[in-house]
Structures are given as C-alpha cells and as structure tokens.
Image (spheres, rainbow, N blue to C red):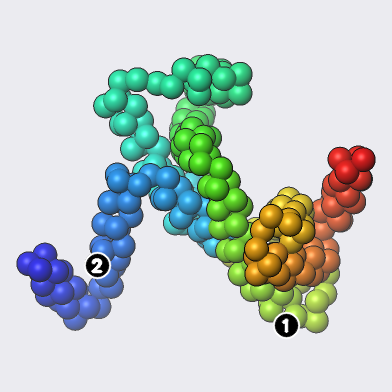
Amino acid sequence: MIFSMLFVVLNTFFIAKESYWFMILPVVLLVALTAFIALDILVLVIVFLTPLSIILQQYDFGVAISIPTEPLLFGVMIIYILRLIYEGKIEKKLFFHPVTIAILINLAWLFLTCITSSLPAVSWKFLLSRLWLVIPFYFVSLHLFKEKKNMRRHVWLYISSFSIVIIYTFINHAMDNFSELAAHVAMNPFYNDHTSYGAILAMYMPPLIFFAFDKDSANNIRLFAFFLLLIFVTGLIFSYTRAAWISIMGALGTLVIYLL
C-alpha cells in the first residue's frame, strides 16, 4: 500500500511536468518479477510480441534494435546465465546434444573472430545479438518444450499476434487499391519489406493447416484455426511475394510425399 501510494504521488508529479515515462514502471517491475519466478512465461510473452515489435534505428551509433523484444531477450539471457552460475550445474543431455555442440562451436568461432576483427565494435555487437537470440530461443526454449503443450502454445501465440499484422497490412494495402508497389511497404513498421513478411506467412501456414484439420483438437479450436488460415491465405496472395508462393507449392509436394 505504501509503495502504491508513493507511485501514485510520484506519477502525478511527473504527469504534471509532462513526463509520461514513469507510468511504465509497474510494467517494468512486472516483467522483472516474471523473469525471476517464471522465465518460461516471459519467453512465451516475447514470442507473442515478436510480430508486433518495431525496429528502432540509431544511425549515429550504428545500432538497430527491435522494441520491446530485444531488451526482453537480453534480460532473459542475463538471468539464464546467472541461474547457470548460481546452480553450478548443467544438463549433460542438453549441452552434449549434437545440435548444442554445433551451436557452441559456432559461438566459440564468432568469439575468436571478434578478437581478430578489424571492426571490433561491429563484431562484438553481432556476437552479443546472436547470444540474446540463441540463449532464450534455444536453451531456454528446450526447457520450455519439455512440456509438449508449450510447443502448441508457442506456435499459437506467434500466429495470433501475426494475424493482427496481416489485418493491419491488408487495411494499408486496401487504401492503395492493392497495388503491387504498395505491397512492398504496407506492412511497415512491423516488417521492412514484403519478402520477410511473405516468408513468415509461408512458414506458419502448414501448422495452421494441421490445426484446422487435427481431429484430436476441439471443434472451436479447429474452426478458429480455419478462420486464421483464410486470413493467412489472403495475406499471402496480396503479399506479392513470389518466393513465398513457390515455397507453399513445394510444401504441398512434401505433404503429398508425407501422406503417402
């Protein structure tokens, strides 16, 4: 109660001074608390926020950062490393898996090339950004996926938020009569161009097809998946991304082989 009242008083003061950043303090504290007591939930939150993130470019310092996901990923990376140090043990099955070994060799090589780099600032930034992607989305996610239901949650969360981006893109595109030129920028600021946008559409359509026709799922889930599938198909058509169209045809060929 004391802290709540203190926050209200301070926030009122800052609002009077036309400074509104103090209002995000409760959100920051909630995220920090979640990171310490439920790191897996925070990773799922990041998955949901990823399609809705916006890249901020700082040309003076040569830095481009995705808000809010990359600061959150950096926090997850720090907490995971601190946990490993605190617990003093590693899971042999996880760390001696061939895929893990390949990733660690790659990271070790990047570290060595950073030392010998002619542009050390660029190299160390690249290594750091690689770490805050690999640690949360590989090492933390492996713990997360021990519960198989989290695999579906992971896919559903991304698909749900990406559907918002598709609708947003569709509205922007409609304002320019669905021209091919407008298709290149209609998804800004969430995606830089239609190629990465089309790639995500193509990659997440097979899981949606599976969810729509999965007999083990409830009818309302299948119906919702079918509705989202229609949104994705519409988004793919109007993305004007030929590579994504061709990749879907290739995926259909793979599906035929799989079914046979």
Q: Is residue 200 left or right of residue 9?
A: right
91 shown above or below 200: above
14 shown above or below 119: below
Image quadrant where residue 5 sits? bottom left
Q: Residue 22 bears which disc, if any?
A: 2
The number of discs equals 2
Quadrant of the image containing the C terminus? top right
For the point 65% across and 69% down, which residue is it?
Answer: 220
- Tell me which amino acid carries mark 2: Phe
Q: Are marks 1 and 2 in contact (CB under 8 Å)?
A: no
- Residue 92 position within the rendered picture, expressed as x and y whole percent measured from the top left: 46, 17
- Residue 244 position within the rendered picture, expressed as x and y whole percent measured from the top left: 82, 53
For the point 18% across and 73% down, which residue is it?
Answer: 11
- Residue 192 visible in the snapshot: yes
Q: Residue 128 bears which disc, if any?
A: none
As helix, strand or loop, the secondary structure at mark 2 comes to helix
204 shown above or below 163: above
Q: Is residue 151 left or right of residue 71?
A: right
The answer for how far apart the CA atoms under marks 1 and 2 are is 37 Å
According to the picture, the residue beneath numbered tag 1 turns out to be: 175
- Residue 103 position within the rendered picture, expressed as x and y whole percent measured from the top left: 57, 24
Q: Which residue occupies the extreme left position in the image?
A: 2
Label whose residue precedes the other's in the sequence (1 or 2): 2
Q: Is residue 226 left or right of residue 247?
A: left
Q: Residues within 10 Å of mark 2 (few under 14, many from 20)?
A: some
- Residue 209 position within the rendered picture, expressed as x and y whole percent measured from the top left: 77, 57
- Tell me which amino acid carries mark 1: Met
As helix, strand or loop, the secondary structure at mark 1 comes to loop
Camera-nearest residue between 45 and 109: 45
- Residue 235 visible in the snapshot: no
Q: Residues within 10 Å of mark 1 (few under 14, many from 20)?
A: few
